[in-house]
Amino acid sequence: MTAYEKPQPYIIKAEERPERYARGWYVIGSSMSVGYKPRMLEVFGTKLVAYRGKEDGNVHILDAYCPHMGGDLSDGEVCGNSVVCPFHKWSWGSDGVCNDIPYAKKIPEKAVIKSWPSLEKSGLIFVWQDPENGEPIPEQEPKKMDDWYSDAWTDWEMAAIPIASLGRELVDNMCDMAHFGPIHYTEVASFMNTMEGHVFVQKMVGGHSILTEGDESLITSVATYEGPAYMTTTMTGMMDGHPMTVHLLVSHIPSDMGNFLINFGVMVKKAEGGTEVENKAMAEAYMEKNIESFQQDVAIWNNKCIIDNPLMCDGDGPINLVRKWYSQFMTDVADISNDQVKARDHVTVEGPSVEETIAKMAC
């Protein structure tokens, strides 16, 4: 390059995207969020209705619009295991098949709406989304969280946070080690990622001013994505001078191609000797602190642009690795390549492991 030549500016690329949502399980809320009154869900660019059957007690999710005259089933009522349209009282079973029309002699054969696979597990309710309309993949069912079933832990404290962006931008955080300092004012002592199949894991040891305040400021974090949208994190550290072990839920579900909702949850290991009221207050306090920290990310997501060809440097985490992993959920099942799902490890910052740090803090 001669003295008068200027380097060409980098061109940011963002692909034109057809309406398509990643295949996998999505959290719609806690078990308490769906009852015997129909609940509206504005997700995947459409509207669904979720309700509990009065006979089986299970959660059922259907398309929300009645194909008769367009009535909104979420404004209807639950009868048995069916939901009844408020407009003309057509009744739709949990399988999506119309099972009663009060004024008709014969139910039309085409009177069927989509029934969405659902799952209730670990105090959470999930819906299965597949652009190919395939059944849930058995090995991708979220693992049981044993601690939720234990009296030693609080129940989920939940909040919903809307974001004006693409869900993939949230998943990028799994590899984005460099944002912890500027956004969360946290130094990183070690940071690594592993992936295999539908699971992607981030392990981190960090803390505020860890180089000067010593071990008491350390936190450990193990964040795990099971599929494209269900992420749980186990953290250890200190809060107000007391040791804490916490499970976080950061699970997004798209409203449409440009917006998603984060179902944010906190579950805390109860303090020894603490009352239910004290333990619930502890969980609520931790929720408040984490939402405050999380809003630092939200402020960025709501204002950043989408970049499909990020310009990376040697200190960044493996953003392209997590995007390759994520791409399997946007690919038809028959076309998924080994490169999208094969086992990989990547160490961005080599340092004390999560396991070593937890053992040291216990001493």
Image (cartoon, helix red, strand yellow):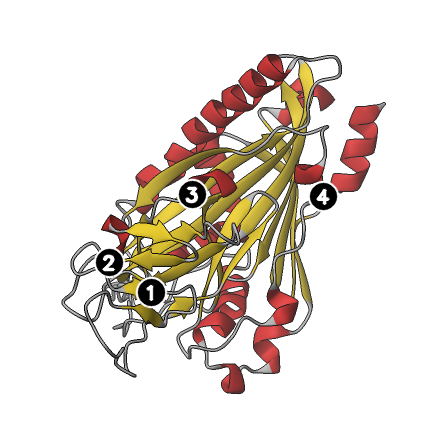
Q: Which of the numbered marks, if any, corresponds to residue 35?
A: 3
- For marks 1 and 4, the one nearer the N-term is 1
In the rendered structure, which amino acid carries the disc numbered 4? Asp
Disc 4 or disc 2, which is closer to the eye? 2
Q: Is residue 134 left or right of residue 21?
A: right
**Quadrant for the C terminus in the image:** top right
**Real-space CA distance between mark 2 and mark 1, rounded to the nearest whole angstrom:** 8 Å
Residue at image coords 57%, 82%? 337
Q: Is residue 66 left or right of residue 56?
A: left
In the rendered structure, which amino acid carries the disc numbered 2? Cys
**Real-space CA distance between mark 4 and mark 2, rounded to the nearest whole angstrom:** 38 Å
Q: Nearer the viewer, residue 36 or 271?
A: 36
Residue at image coords 38%, 34%? 296
- For marks 4 and 2, the one nearer the N-term is 2
Q: Which residue is mark 1?
A: 92
Q: Which residue is mark 2?
A: 85
**How crowded is the residue under tag 2: few (<14 C-alpha within 10 Å), some, or many (20+)?**
many
**How crowded is the residue under tag 1: few (<14 C-alpha within 10 Å), some, or many (20+)?**
many
* Residues at circles 4 and 3 in contact by the CB criterion of under 8 Å: no
Name the secondary structure under disc 3: loop
Q: Which of the numbered marks, if any, corresponds to residue 146?
A: 4
Residue at image coords 62%, 18%? 279
Where's residue 44, x and y in %? 32, 62
* Residues at circles 2 and 1 in contact by the CB criterion of under 8 Å: yes
Name the secondary structure under disc 2: loop
Task: Say above or below: 254 vs 104.
Answer: above
Where's residue 160, x and y in %? 38, 39
**Quadrant for the N terminus in the image:** bottom left
In the rendered structure, which amino acid carries the disc numbered 3? Gly
